[in-house]
Amino acid sequence: MNSACGVNNGLIRFQHMAGNQRIPGLWDWPSSCYKTPAMTLTKPTFPAPDHDHGRCTAEAIAHAEQVCARRAQKFTPIRRQVLQALLSSHRPLGAYEVIDELAKSMPRPAPITVYRALDFLMENGLVHRIESRNAFLACAHDHDETSMVAFLICDHCGSVGEIPAAPVAQSLNAAARASGFAPKLSVVEIAGTCAHCQNK
């Protein structure tokens, strides 16, 4: 069984295909159904190449401190350092790339130490895992780990942006349940070209 998705006459259409036969009744909703955000976008999806990255990083660390304080969680030095390593760019990093980044300014940490810090940061909505890249991305948006987002992955510069995706992900989960499947994780990743790379 494969899937097809398209937009036609203002409708976002998703259909499951079994051979050439469409399984009717899954989704034909107006695009207005997808306009309610599940998170607060306080920053541009893709920062401009000449943005103040130092300020961007400082704001993300301050956001992490606020989240941890609000949840009575400890923002330990290693958790802070792992987040800072991920904030070194707007590209996702693999765990060993995080270790390499940390090794520039401290003794090389053990992989298990970094993975534990990453787990904590993901549980608190401060880091996302990009499944298709097996990598991690720092997040400074105002949402928790249960919020559903879509990742926009630029094939040219490697940057990743995130946008709200709750209505789409919830609809995917509903369709999966309607077919007797019990979903437990919804990840939406869209590859393409960011506006900055298109304008080069």
Image (tube, rainbow, N blue to C red):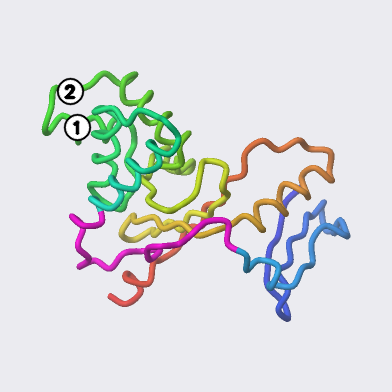
The answer to whether 118 is drawn above or below residue 156 in the figure is above
Disc 1 from disc 2: Cα separation: 7 Å
- Say which amino acid is labelled 2: Arg
Instruction: Indicate whether residue 42 is drawn in magenta.
Output: yes
* Left or right placement of residue 63 versus residue 28 in this view: left
Residue nearest the observer in this picture, 19 or 90: 90
Residue occupying the point 49% across, 49% down:
143
Give neighbour class at mark 2: few <14, some 14-19, many 20+ (Cα, 10 Å). Answer: few
Magenta part of the chain: 37-56
Residue closest to the far left: 105
The answer to whether 38 is drawn above or below residue 1 in the figure is below
Q: Where residue 122 sits: x, y (%)?
A: 44, 36
Residue closest to the far bottom: 9
- From the image, give the main secondary structure of the stretch colored magenta: loop
Residues marked 1 and 2 touching at CB (< 8 Å): yes
* Left or right placement of residue 172 versus residue 87 in this view: right
Which quarter of the figure has residue 119? top left
The answer to whether 88 is drawn above or below residue 79 in the figure is below
Q: Where residue 166 sits: x, y (%)?
A: 62, 55
The answer to whether 195 is drawn above or below residue 163 in the figure is below
Instruction: Indicate whether residue 38 is drawn in magenta.
Output: yes
Label ID, residue 108:
2
Residue occupying the point 28% across, 45% down:
61
Residue occupying the point 36% across, 64% down:
46
Q: Where residue 55 sits: x, y (%)?
A: 21, 57
Residue occupying the point 77% across, 68% down:
29
- Say which amino acid is labelled 1: Leu
Q: Which of marks 1 and 2 is nearer the N terminus?
A: 1
Label ID, residue 102:
1
Q: Locate the C terminus by quadrant.
A: bottom left
